Image (cartoon, rainbow, N blue to C red):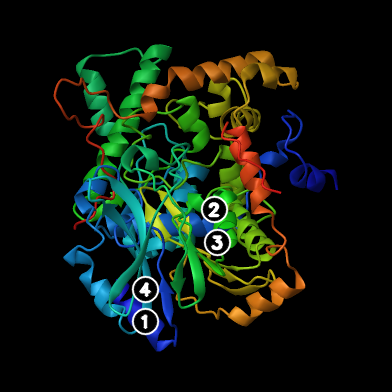
Amino acid sequence: MTEVLSRTGVIRPDPKDPSALRIDEVLVRKMLVLFIRDETLKARLKRAVVGVSGGVDSAVSVALASEALGPENVLGLFTPYRHSSEESRRHAWALSKQFGFRLEEVPITAQVDAYFRAAPVDESDPRIRIRMGNKMARERKSIEYDRSWPDGIVIGTSNKTELLLGYGTQFGDMASGINPVGDLYKTQLRELALHLGVPEVIVRKAPTAELWEGQTDEGELGFTYADADLVLYHMVDRRLRPSELIAAGFDASLVNRIREMVRKNHYKRVMPLIAKVSLRTVGHDFLYPRDWEAD
Amino acid sequence: MHASWIVRAREAGARLVVFPELSLTGYYLKDLAADVACAADDPQLAPIAEASRDIDISAGFVERSADAKLHIAQGYWSKGKLVHVHRKVYLPTYGIFDDGRYFGPGDRFETFKSVGGSTGVAICEDLWHVSTPYLYAAAGAMVVLAPSASPGRGVAEGGDLGTAESCRLMDRFYAQYLTLYVVYVNRVGHEDGIAFWGGSEIVAPDGTVVARAPEFDEHLLVGDIDPDLVARERARNPLLRDEREDIVLRNVAGRLGLPLERRD
């Protein structure tokens, strides 16, 4: 009863009330399926390529793409590195079976290791781990783009939480032609995943990019997606200031840390800056819709 | 695309077909606005004029005025001729909107005679300003055509699309309290990731929804406009008859420092 009331009544910032994040899954599913279909066909493309990690974000993207374009037009790519888990592989194949899209395995161990062997690195050094993680993410994306040629589009899998926190690799996992899940927080995406029929074991497992052994998102971030999403929702969607959130009972260090991550990583969310010297410049005052259609 | 829908509308027995805002060009044009602009009497629009010999047509385009300003415009063609052009007055330039950067505002709300009787056009944001339908109603309009390009947003649980709820509330409120027909015509499809949600509807002066199109799907929505119902509603509920425009005028004029002389 209280849940219903808190949803239909005034939305207040309350660290104990996650109901503001609930979405209408039927409506969102319809919007996202139409989005993928419209934007793919308008680009004169007909296939989709999705990196399928076995996690919930790519599960949702690939399920939506299969529904939008027909599973026969969707290629899933499972791109394991040597320490990717057997469970991830199982989950990727389970998704392929369930949603009917073709899945291919393209290991990236050989090329990533060859690159780092040229200038040997110490894998236990956390800074090297970041470099290796970024390299893996970009390696995977380069394969997705390669396999999308000539008539396919790369479907993004970065959710709103990751995009806002900047928790991803620029031109790596953050890259895509179109992204159906980029306006859904992680907790909303889990809700949508269950609605789409993604197996619960995939939806509920601890999120990880598997960039090194034992890595989990929440372990690395130092907070949970549930907590971060609620802060982000009130801060971004409802435009509350950090001071107002803290006054409403949100943890001050969490709020400040999240605010700082959003600010610091904004560069990852925008196109590269172009130095303006001429009368008309790409990105500044040469402004056309991306869906620039023929006359 | 317009040609086939015009034929279908005619075959469905309609006497007027209304297309959404900027229907001939697309909505998020940015710098394309100047490229696709034309004068209201440009030969490019001749096929629309020609098609209006059999059925009245209202469609949206970018108008380049005689002094080369760009406007979001909605034309009304009848019997082979352009009868009326409304230039969007309120150009939203906030959030996801940037109309004011690319277009100049219209400066008037004029009624004209359509097949539905005295009619005013409110393009999208125009309708969100209460004064727009009010001015039309005060000028005698029995129909407000509201061509729109409304981006869908707000997907909270337990309700319809947030934008759809707002628009329906607006349509019904204006229709019932100004005792006129609201013909809301919304775009469908995606432009640069933005979803136009459709859901066009005709709302009668008694507040009933005459017809409503599905959301997100292209659809030929057909419904009747009954001038007798307007008359019956205005007899039953004479809000417009009792409206004191003079008081509105004195209030507004006074606040703007242009006090009018009382003549009573």
Q: Which circle, 3 or 4, is nearer the viewer?
A: 3
For the question of whether residue A54 can be seen, the reply is no
Q: Residues within 10 Å of mark 1 (few under 14, many from 20)?
A: many
In percent of width and height, residue A108 lies at 29, 36
Measure the alpha-carbon separation of dots 3 and 1.
Answer: 26 Å
Q: Secondary structure at mark 1?
A: loop
Q: Nearer the viewer, mark 1 or mark 2?
A: 2
* Residue A187 in view of the camera: yes
- Whichever of labels 3 and 4 marks the residue nearer the N terminus, that label is 4
Determine whether, in the image, residue B4 is placed left or right of residue B141.
left
Task: Quote the CA–CA distance across marks 3 and 2.
Answer: 11 Å
User: Which chain contains the residue that carries disc 4?
Assistant: B
User: Which image quadrant is residue B42 in?
Assistant: bottom left
Q: Which chain contains the residue that carries disc 1?
A: B
What amino acid type is highlighted by mark number 4?
A: Ile
**Image spot of residue A33 (x, y percent):** 45, 58
Q: CA distance from mark 2 to mark 4?
A: 22 Å
Q: Upstream in the sequence, badge 2 or badge 4?
A: 4
Determine which quarter of the picture holds residue B46: bottom left
Q: Are marks 4 and 1 in contact (CB under 8 Å)?
A: yes
Amino acid type of the residue tagged 1 in the rendering: Ile
The reply to whether label 3 and label 2 mark residues of one chain is yes
Q: Where's the C terminus of chain A, which quadrant?
A: bottom left
The residue identified by callout 3 is B139
